[in-house]
Image (cartoon, helix red, strand yellow):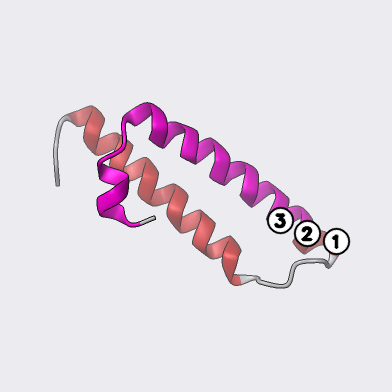
Amino acid sequence: MRKSEMRQLAVDDLRQRVVDSKDELFRLKFQLNSGQLQNYRRIREIKREIAQIKTIIKEKELGGSV
């Protein structure tokens, strides 16, 4: 999902996406430790997505549209 699309979502929806992404990250780390993970890059992508969503949530809470 693009940043512009994420900015249009409500804060509650964004928080749910963070929870879902953290769950996926947990599963990916579990697969990594058990040797089943094929796409290592996905871990980095999920971490980045979580950070971007958290940034957008903080912007909305502060009332800015940076």
Residue occupied by mark 1: 34
Callout 3: helix, strand or loop?
helix
* Image coords of residue 19 (percent x, y): 54, 36
Spatial CA distance of label 3 from label 2 is 5 Å
45 on left or right of 32 = left
**Residue extent of the magenta highlight:** 2-31
Looking at the image, how many numbered discs can be counted on the residues? Answer: 3
Residue occupied by mark 3: 29
Q: Residue at x 58, y 71 (%)?
A: 41
Where residue 33 sits, quadrant-wise, is bottom right
Spatial CA distance of label 3 from label 1 is 9 Å
* Image coords of residue 56 (percent x, y): 29, 42
Where residue 8 sits, quadrant-wise, is top left
Q: Do the residues labelled 1 and 2 touch (CB within 8 Å)?
A: yes
Name the chief secondary structure element in magenta: helix
Residue occupied by mark 2: 31
Check disc 3: other Cα within 10 Å, few if <14, some if 14-19, many if 20+: some
Q: Which residue is drawn at 38% across and 41% down?
A: 54
Q: Which residue is drawn at 51% across and 55% down?
A: 47
Check disc 2: other Cα within 10 Å, few if <14, some if 14-19, many if 20+: some
The kind of residue tagged 1 is Ser
- Asked if residue 20 is among those painted magenta in the image, a careful observer would answer yes
Q: Do the residues labelled 3 and 2 touch (CB within 8 Å)?
A: yes
- Asked if residue 24 is among those painted magenta in the image, a careful observer would answer yes
Where residue 28 sits, quadrant-wise, is bottom right
Mark closest to the chain's N terminus, 3 or 1:
3
Tell me if residue 39 comes above or below residue 23 in the rendering: below
Tell me if residue 53 comes above or below residue 57 in the rendering: below
* Image coords of residue 61 (percent x, y): 25, 28
Tell me if residue 35 comes above or below residue 24 in the rendering: below
For residue 22, which numbered disc appears in the image?
A: none
The kind of residue tagged 3 is Lys
